[in-house]
Amino acid sequence: MTSRPLRVCSLLLSLLLCLAFPALPALAAGDKTLPAYAVPANSLSSHKPLTVRLGRARLAMVGRLIDGTPYLPVAELCDLYADCRIRNTADGWTLEAPGLSVSAWSGATYLTVNGRVFYDPHPVAILSDGDLYVPIETAKRLSGLTLAFVPATATVTLSGGFTPPRSGDAVYDPDALYWLSRIISAESRGEPLAGQIAVGNVILNRVRSTAFPNTIWGVIFDRKDGVQFTPVANGTVYASPYWISTVAAKICLEGYSVSTSALFFYEPSKATSSWIENNRPYLFTIGHHRFFS
């Protein structure tokens, strides 16, 4: 097991991302801006301490309430598991424990866990004690533990057993990942990650809508009212996806949503029609794309 300072540095990015499932906020129809989160200060005294219990036993571990979100220190979490190691790599950090492999790099807002990608808009924080702190939702997905936060008593309770997440090969449908990553790359290469996720959300929102085909391939190649996506017309949808677009596709397939209501988007500078602008309710803009319900 590595020393604590190395462990903190190692996981810095590892746990930058997180999990996104239903626990994370989605934009409601009519919202014009994305939620933004930031750690206001790195001083321990700036953040309310949280008692941490494992069952009925109180742990030496102390959590922190950062901008209303409960966080736990990663080094102490790692100490709960046998043979947990964190190490530096050439391009970032990795955490290894039995059945668990986590990696990330500096500045990322996501982490790779057993071949999957977890995202969380709440940033990790290195506080003045030198420890890395992550939101409890991140810790929950990584460990499989049940974590409950009781604001009235400022207590986080851990229960259950360590259960590593299933691998990406077991979770992602290969065909879904293949086509979703390609349409995201073809439509939004060069856009911010949030914008690429939003494009993926549009595809998946259409899959769930009765007004469109019920598969990712069907949505992409839908021709009911003409070709729906320019990359289908010009053939760029068949190109290998840029790596960050595959990351965005996995984040979408994990269930993270910038918007559950977005069904259309376009880039004004390249648009050849104003139909969307004139006929669909505007939601928000990310990068060069405007999104509509």
Image (tube, helix red, strand yellow):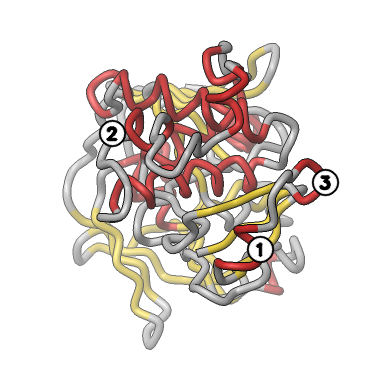
Residue at 39 percent of width and 35 percent of height: 222
Label number found at residue 264 = none
Q: Nearer the viewer, residue 240 or 39?
A: 240
Residue located beneath label 1 in the image: 277
Q: Earlier in the sequence, mark 2 or mark 1?
A: 2
In the image, residue 219 lies at what x, y percent? 37, 37
Q: Nearer the viewer, residue 269 or 192?
A: 269
SS for callout 3 = helix
In the image, residue 171 lies at what x, y percent? 26, 29
Distance from the alpha carbon under mark 3 to that under mark 1: 13 Å
Q: Amino acid at mark 2?
A: Pro
| Number of other residues with Cα within 10 Å of mark 3, as a class: few under 14, some 14 to 19, many 20 or more | few
Q: Earlier in the sequence, mark 3 or mark 1?
A: 3
CB under 8 Å between discs 3 and 2: no
Q: Amino acid at mark 1?
A: Glu
Label number found at residue 269 = 3
Quadrant position of residue 211:
bottom left
In the image, residue 210 lies at what x, y percent? 25, 55
Residue located beneath label 2 in the image: 165
Q: Is residue 92 above or below residue 212?
A: above
Residue positioned most to the right: 269
| Number of other residues with Cα within 10 Å of mark 1, as a class: few under 14, some 14 to 19, many 20 or more | some
Q: Amino acid at mark 3?
A: Ser
In the image, residue 65 lies at what x, y percent? 55, 71
Residue positioned most to the bottom: 152
Residue positioned most to the left: 160
Residue at 18 percent of width and 43 percent of height: 161
Q: Nearer the viewer, residue 96 or 263?
A: 263
Q: Earlier in the sequence, mark 3 or mark 2?
A: 2
Q: Is residue 267 left or right of residue 235?
A: right
